[in-house]
Image (cartoon, rainbow, N blue to C red):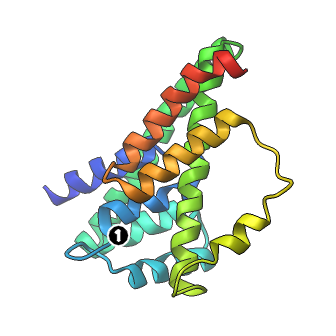
């Protein structure tokens, strides 16, 4: 039963892995890190640090490690296969759909929103690691914001990314819903801005 849970949990993560392994870090944090959960924030920080110096993507290394903690060899194998399985199935399907519908505003908007959600989640991961390692008393937000004076972005990009960041930091909304709602919001807004 544990291996089935591991496979399904990591398959869900594999379905939502827009933007690479660093986008998975907030998903892993929400599922496995915290009081009464599998990992402490410090242990998770060490896991990601070790994943950086070992061969392979951070998402697969983290899945293998978490699976190993849960059920040794079979847990590691199951979690890793669960993370990779959706990509293997959906990659061919997605490529054929994207080639066929690449010029539609709906698909462009869907990908636009998913990209912005991925950026938000990667930014969240960076914030977590900066606060764990460099700034234990909190980030100097005024200094960080001053570096974006001449940075040009679209208004819809700011809206979607800002809403995703707000929901991640303030509300108990799962990161799965953040990705899906950002993709849908991008699909709805893109015809007006694209």
Callout 1: SS: helix
Q: Kindly indicate the quadrant of the structure image that contains residue 69.
A: bottom left
Q: Kindly indicate the quadrant of the structure image that contains residue 65.
A: bottom left
Quick one: which residue is furthest to the right in this view? 150
User: Residue drawn at (43%, 59%), measured in percent from left and top?
Assistant: 169
Task: Estimate the x, y position of residue 18 in percent, counting from the top left.
Answer: 55, 43
Q: Is residue 100 above or below residue 19?
A: above
Position of the N terminus, as image quadrant, is: bottom left
Is residue 159 toward the left or the right of residue 155 in the image?
left
Task: Estimate the x, y position of residue 130 in percent, counting from the top left.
Answer: 58, 78
Q: Kindly indicate the quadrant of the structure image that contains residue 37.
A: bottom left
Is residue 114 toward the left or the right of residue 83 in the image?
right
Residue matched to label 1: 66
Q: Is residue 30 above or below residue 91?
A: below
Task: Estimate the x, y position of residue 45 in percent, counting from the top left.
Answer: 47, 79
User: Residue drawn at (52%, 28%), measured in percent from left and top?
Assistant: 185
Q: Nearer the viewer, residue 79 or 32?
A: 32
Q: Is residue 140 above or below residue 29?
A: below
Q: Is residue 140 above or below residue 8?
A: below
- Exactly how many numbered labels are in the figure? 1
User: Residue drawn at (47%, 51%), measured in percent from left and top?
Assistant: 166
Position of the C terminus, as image quadrant, is: top right
Task: Estimate the x, y position of residue 59 in percent, counting from the top left.
Answer: 50, 61
For label 1, count other residues whose C-alpha is less than 10 Å away and answer few (under 14), some (14-19) or many (20+).
Answer: many
Q: Nearer the viewer, residue 191 or 141?
A: 141
User: Residue drawn at (33%, 80%), measured in percent from left and top?
Assistant: 40
């Amino acid at each position: 039963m544990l291996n089935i849970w591991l496979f399904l949990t990591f398959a869900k993560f594999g379905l939502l892995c827009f933007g690479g392994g660093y986008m998975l870090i907030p998903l892993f944090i929400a599922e496995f890190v915290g009081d009464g959960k599998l990992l402490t924030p410090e242990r998770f920080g060490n896991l990601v640090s070790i994943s950086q110096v070992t061969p392979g993507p951070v998402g697969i290394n983290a899945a293998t490690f978490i699976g190993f903690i849960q059920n040794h060899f079979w847990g590691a194998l199951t979690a890793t296969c669960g993370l990779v399985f959706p990509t293997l199935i959906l990659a061919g399907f997605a490529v054929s759909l994207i080639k066929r519908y690449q010029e539609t505003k709906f698909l462009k908007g869907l990908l636009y929103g998913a990209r912005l959600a991925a950026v938000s989640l990667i930014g969240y991961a960076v914030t977590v690691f900066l606060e764990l390692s460099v700034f234990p008393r909190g980030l100097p937000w005024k200094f960080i914001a001053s570096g974006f004076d001449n940075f040009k972005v679209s208004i819809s990009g700011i809206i979607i990314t800002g809403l995703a960041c707000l929901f991640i930091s303030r509300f108990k909304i799962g990161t799965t819903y953040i990705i899906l709602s950002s993709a849908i919001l991008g699909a709805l807004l893109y015809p007006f801005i694209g």
